[in-house]
Amino acid sequence: MFCAGILVFTLSAAQSARELIPAEGWLPQWTASYDVIAYQGDDLFFLINGGADLYMEYGFADVAAVELKHPDLGALYVEVYRMDSDSAAAGIFSLRKGNLQVEAGAALWRAFAADAMHLWRGNFYVSASGNGLKEDKRQEVFDALTAHFLNQTTSGHKLPLMLKHLPDPGSTRFSYIMGPLALGNIYSFGPGNLFQISEGVVAEQDDHRLFVFHYPNAQKVADVFAQVLQFMQTTNRFSNFSELRQGFSVTDRNGNVLQGSLSENLIRLSLQL
């Protein structure tokens, strides 16, 4: 567990990723291998060419990256992304962590792989790679890095409001999406933006995957659902179409049954696993 009793001091709400990233000497004996790399807006492609579009879809402000070295502990690589909102940062975190178990605290969320840490606090997403660290020292360094971000930022995070539509709004087993690229990282419904999605949430349940997409009004959701019904009846991506009382049922190419329904301003899908 990370330390909760850390002094937090106030910085500007417009704090950049570069201001937040650990600098030379953030802890004794830690030095930077090179000057901090920082990009704003579309220049993100210079750092992660091929993956920047996803961040842009969520709403990206700026990023900073650096490698830090310690003579005894090894090397740590850190990327800090400032997103346009807490929800955008939550979305990137939810995708980048994959199926890793989340350690959810009141001040921040984090998830660990064998040699990496993903962290979400406010409108910041942090990715830390510790494959250059001594294996038995990784957790110690990740905890120190967590303390740094708790000290350097002013508040905790706000969960996306979409979570209220899940059976268990308190679950951490969700992916928050804000466009077709994010959705395609989870499940492919084919090319294009079939569901015209700008906000949604995907949650892993015991025997199925739940998709909930939100629309601004009843007319919009009805128009989109009508297009989805037509697509499901004519595409070769799905088969065994049947119209249900409030929706439809099809089978995907893997033999999994997908059911969809319309509910107020929401489209709900259930994919059997």
Image: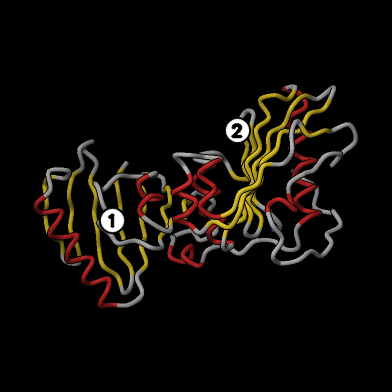
Question: The residue tagged with tag 2: helix, strand or loop?
Answer: loop
Residue 80 position in % (x across, y down): 65, 47
Q: Residue at x 77, y 24 (%)?
A: 74
Residue 250 position in % (x across, y down): 17, 49
Residue 48 position in % (x across, y down): 52, 40
From this viewpoint, which residue is outermost toward the right?
28
Decide if residue 79 is on the left or right side of residue 162. Answer: right
Q: Residue at x 75, y 53 (%)?
A: 19
From this viewpoint, which residue is outermost toward the left?
234
Question: The residue tagged with tag 1: helix, strand or loop?
Answer: loop
Q: Is residue 222 visible?
A: yes
Kind of residue sitting beneath label 2: Ala
Q: Which mark is residue 113?
A: 2
Kind of residue sitting beneath label 1: Asn
Mark 2 burial class by Cα count in 10 Å: few <14, some 14-19, many 20+: some
Q: Which residue is mark 1?
A: 193
Decide if residue 55 is on the left or right side of residue 114. Answer: left
Q: How many marks?
A: 2
Q: Which mark is residue 252?
A: none
Quarter occupied by the N terminus: top right
Occupied quadrant, residue 72: top right
266 or 231: which is nearer to us?
Answer: 231
Q: Residue at x 18, y 44 (%)?
A: 251
Instruction: Report how far apart the C-alphas of labels 1 and 2 lie in the structure.
Output: 32 Å
Q: Is residue 199 above or below residue 62?
A: below
Q: Is residue 110 visible?
A: no
Q: If you read the primary sequence from the N terminus, does the residue marked by circle 1 or circle 2 appear first?
A: 2
Residue 111 position in % (x across, y down): 62, 41
Occupied quadrant, residue 268: bottom left
Q: Is residue 64 above or below residue 254?
A: below
- CB under 8 Å between discs 1 and 2: no
